[in-house]
Amino acid sequence: MDRLDNTIRPYAWGSTTAIPHLLGVEPSGEPQAEMWMGAHPGAPSRTARGTLVEVIETDPRRDLGPETVAKFGPRLPFLLKILAAGAPLSLQVHPDLKQAQEGYTDEERRGVPVDAPHRNYKDANHKPELICALTEFDGLCGFRAPAEAADLLAALDVDSLKPYVDLLRAHPEEAALREVLPAVLTADREEIAHTVTEAAAAGARLGGAPAPYAGIARHYPGDPGVLAAMLLNHVRLQPGEALFLGAGIPHAYLSGLGVEIMANSDNVLRCGLTPKHVDVPELLRVVRFEAADPGVLRPEAGPDGEEVYETPIDEFRLSRYVLPEGAAARDLTLTTPQILLCTAGAVQAGEHRLTPGQSVFVPAGEKAEVSGAGTVFRATVVV
């Protein structure tokens, strides 16, 4: 096994206390948003053998296993993170694999620099993801039914919202959502900012269902993404619960600490709550205009104590073990690569003692035995 030394990304929306508290260190006062575990070239984990990118490139079949290399190529197909949201993240959506390949090819053909602020596709891969709450965790996930969205907007009693209410009530579900989202995002900026200010004030005054959106507006005053967010389901996860975000599903994380896993991609199309580029035509090509229950996931227990978060994705598989005091050691050996992450207590993983926030990379086929009293998340792939 390789103990991982992981990079913490200081994005502005990060919590100043959540990751330091997990790691048992003093906060620096700076936001700490994400801790990355994996072989993403942007911030690969470091090991005694070099970065995890270098380790895998040296002998992919040894570290990933022949089955993983045959299915996904000579790279680790997932990225594992600890995510700590102290403020809302941008409202966003991810493409499916075909859309990502088409978008990346088109931007490459047109010579759009990969680091250009208006570039949509950094790679040709899709980016499904799963977030599992370690603390109470608030987020937005998928469109609510248009009739429910209309009722929410109508309850705010803001005159400039009435055209959106009428559109939501006048059309079938897909057509209503497809009309209203671009109408909000392309409205006159000064007028929509005034509407957002009025809507936020009304939400704060009313409380209840509109209250979370008033909170979002405090972070992003006047941003049309606040109104776009009102079209989405608000979800509050309890520790151990999770959300799966597939292609085309608009979503945003609002607050809380969680373990996140995703396909190894950086493709994000933003819908709002950001000063960054919003490409409305491309967004409309990718978004799935379907109302749906957000589908809170709870882990399914297996016979050996493994609790699995089932998803339809092969690039990653997330599960956890809650090890009680005095329990026998568990053999976690697999023919696929793994990252083991401790989030509570203290566990022994091979020769490595792991406390909260610490992790190891386990090459394919390497003996992986864990013991102790604590919680261990296991990230691997499906072959």
Image (cartoon, helix red, strand yellow):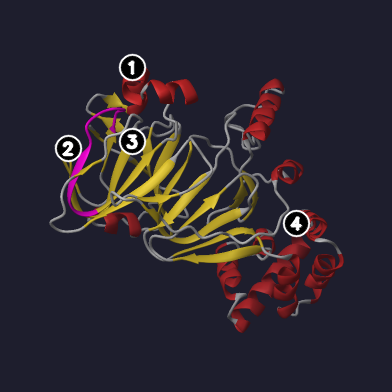
Q: Earlier in the sequence, mark 1 or mark 3?
A: 1
Residues marked 4 and 1 touching at CB (< 8 Å): no
In the rendered structure, which amino acid carries the disc numbered 3? Gln
As for residue 371 lying within the magenta part, the answer is yes
Q: Which numbered mark, 2 or 1, is in the foreground of this view?
A: 2
Callout 1 touching callout 3 (CB < 8 Å): no
- Write the residue at 58% across / 46% down: 246
Q: Residues within 10 Å of mark 2 (few under 14, many from 20)?
A: some
Secondary element at image label 3: strand
C-alpha gap between disc 4 and disc 3: 40 Å
Q: In the drawing, does residue 309 fall left or right of residue 227?
A: left
User: Can you tell which of label 4 and label 2 is closer to the viewer?
Assistant: 2
* Residue bearing the label numbered 2: 350
Magenta region: 362-374
In the shown orientation, is residue 234 left or right of residue 42? Answer: right
Looking at the rendered structure, the kind of residue marked 4 is Leu
Q: CA distance from mark 1 to mark 3?
A: 16 Å
Residue type beneath disc 2: Gly
> Residue 181: which numbered mark, if any?
4
Q: Which residue is mark 1?
A: 59
Number of marks in the image? 4
Residue 106 percent across, percent down from the top left: 71, 26
For marks 2 and 3, the one nearer the N-term is 3
Circle 1 SS class = loop
Residue 77 sits in which quadrant?
top left
Is residue 25 shown left or right of residue 111? Answer: left
